[in-house]
Image (cartoon, grey):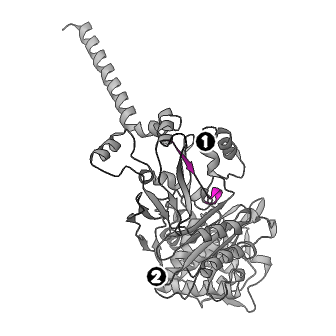
């Protein structure tokens, strides 16, 4: 074979190899991307031609369903009977905008096999049920409604969790939107309006946005101090109204520039109950970055929450090494300011972990999967994620948190006849009103097997109150409304 023929053969071989590689890449590696792209007209045809399963709440309220077209029973319209109430939990399944929420994470169960795909054909040949499965959520309709109404149009979020299982009992984010507006073929303008809305109604603030947690983070700092043996509930600290931060001209003061009660010293418990910034700034330095960051990470910071039912972003705290020779930054972090950021979901998990004796649980939204005949085929089991701190630390934190509600900054979260523990937070935001927080749980004295609830409430930038907002005045009453609803139903 002469040179030109060899060159031609080599070129043809290389060209063929490139073609095979390109086809393989598109059909194998990028297949799902092209298949699921809402601009794919075959996807639109498949969506309207396939029935999706029903999604109901824990107490049987229909949150999503497929309705057949009167003129063509093979064409279905996805409907959301409760409108905007479950928009961020259930999400939506649309031809133009794809799937979100539970509609996306549980698409395999919700989608009918009545089509011409290979899996559908094989399932039919094997005599399988081609009808879609349905889902029962862990969310309680009354709690969800109460949480949404308690937000009263303010920008923020509420998350409620069963501490012993991790089941999400309520997840409300405001502003919200009506997914029914996105299901039609002419929904482009509505979708564009939602995407361009400066209040970001499509964002699930409960799990997909982080904020400075303010004094609610003192729960983590106290846990680190108790676990490391640096301090106990009765350990005394200087009762200062302001402390100067080492190596800095900055200072940290208590709310109102006051001392925490009378006397030259104050105990850790009193400092927690009255939310003394000065004590916790000093405590953070004494605990040290390794213990503080380690405790936060044991509770889930710097890791995306281990849940497959919904998308959640990681809460964040700087790595321990970043605090070397930076005690001022460590002190600010210890009171939930500076660079520490958390989702409402994360803060609800912290409250739930205290209630659960230090045991961290995976949050989940789907309780059961049932077939078209309403027979349960799969039941979700609670998943422990590890121990964040000892039962002794949990007990000490519980006593301090109860003090916050009975005699401290969280008294507006009081529920008659029920022992509630909590922690308020007022997170300063540069150039804006503070974020108002409350985390808590009850009953504090729950007997084994008795239902419990843990909660986190966040109101962005002071809500309707503005610059005068605090966690105790704005977020705690919202928590109280949800907690009262939970206990009024004998849950």
Residue nearest the observer in this picture, 242 or 384: 384
Quadrant for the N terminus in the image: top left
Separation (CA) of disc 1 from disc 2: 52 Å
Q: Tell me where residue 223 appears, x and y as whole percent.
A: 54, 79
Instruction: Name the residue beneath numbered marker 1.
Output: 184
Residue at position x 44%, y 37% in the image? 35
Residue 79 is one of the magenta-drawn residues: yes
- How would you rate the neighbour count of disc 2 (Cα within 10 Å): few for under 14, some for 14-19, many for 20 or more? some
Q: Is 35 positioned to the left or the right of 245 in the image?
A: left
Q: Tell me where residue 474 appears, x and y as whole percent.
A: 74, 72
Q: Relative to 66, does residue 281 appear above or below in the rendering?
A: below
The reply to whether residue 315 is in sight is no
Residue 81 is one of the magenta-drawn residues: yes
Give residue 63's quadrant in the image.
Answer: bottom right
Q: Magenta stretch?
A: 75-85
Residue nearest the observer in this picture, 204 or 283: 204
Residue 390's disc is: 2
Residue at position x 47%, y 50% in the image? 52
Numbered disc 2: secondary structure: loop
The reply to whether residue 344 is in sight is yes
Residue 90's disc is: none
Q: Tell me where residue 341 appears, x and y as whole percent.
A: 61, 63
């Amino acid at each position: 074979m002469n040179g030109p023929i060899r060159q031609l053969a080599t070129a043809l071989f290389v060209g063929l190899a490139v073609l095979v590689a390109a086809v393989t890449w598109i059909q194998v590696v990028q297949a799902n991307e092209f298949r699921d792209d809402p601009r794919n007209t075959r996807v639109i045809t498949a969506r309207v031609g396939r029935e999706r399963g029903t999604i109901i709440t824990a107490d049987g309220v229909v949150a999503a369903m497929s309705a057949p077209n009167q003129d063509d029973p093979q064409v279905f319209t996805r409907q959301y009977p409760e409108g905007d109430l479950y928009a961020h939990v259930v999400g939506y399944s649309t031809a133009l905008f794809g799937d979100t929420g539970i509609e996306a994470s549980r698409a395999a169960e919700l989608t009918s096999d009545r089509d011409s795909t290979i899996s559908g054909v094989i399932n039919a040949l094997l005599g399988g049920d081609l009808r879609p499965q349905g889902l029962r959520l862990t969310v309680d309709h009354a709690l969800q409604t109460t949480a949404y109404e308690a937000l009263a149009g303010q920008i923020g979020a509420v998350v409620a969790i069963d501490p012993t299982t991790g089941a999400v009992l309520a997840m409300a984010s405001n502003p919200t939107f009506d997914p029914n507006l996105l299901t039609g073929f002419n929904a482009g303008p509505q979708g564009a309006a939602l995407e361009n809305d400066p209040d970001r109604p499509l964002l699930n603030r409960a799990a997909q946005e982080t904020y400075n947690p303010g004094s609610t983070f003192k729960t983590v700092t106290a846990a680190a101090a108790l676990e490391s043996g640096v301090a106990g509930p009765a350990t005394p600290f200087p009762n200062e109204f302001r402390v100067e931060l080492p190596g800095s001209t900055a200072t940290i003061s208590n709310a109102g520039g006051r001392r925490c009660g009378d006397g030259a010293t104050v105990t850790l418990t009193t400092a927690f109950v009255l939310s003394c910034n000065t004590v916790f700034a000093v405590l953070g330095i004494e605990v040290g970055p390794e213990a503080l960051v380690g405790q936060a990470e044991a509770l889930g910071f710097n890791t995306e929450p281990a849940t497959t039912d919904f998308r959640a972003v990681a809460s964040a705290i700087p790595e321990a090494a970043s605090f070397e020779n930076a005690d001022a930054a460590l002190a600010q972090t210890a009171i939930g300011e500076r660079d520490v950021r958390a989702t409402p979901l994360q803060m609800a998990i912290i409250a739930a972990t205290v209630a659960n004796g230090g045991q961290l649980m995976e949050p989940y939204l789907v309780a059961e999967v049932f077939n078209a005949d309403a027979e349960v085929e799969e039941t979700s089991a609670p998943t422990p994620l590890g121990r964040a701190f000892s039962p002794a630390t949990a007990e000490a934190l519980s006593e301090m948190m109860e003090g916050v509600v009975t005699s401290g900054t969280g008294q507006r979260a009081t529920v008659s006849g029920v022992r509630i523990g909590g922690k308020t937070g007022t997170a300063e935001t540069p150039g804006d009103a503070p974020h108002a927080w409350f985390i808590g749980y009850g009953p504090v004295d729950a007997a084994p097997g008795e239902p419990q609830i843990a909660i986190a409430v966040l109101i962005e930038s002071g809500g309707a109150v503005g610059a005068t907002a605090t966690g105790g005045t704005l977020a705690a009453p919202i928590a109280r409304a949800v907690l009262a609803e939970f206990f009024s139903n004998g849950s």
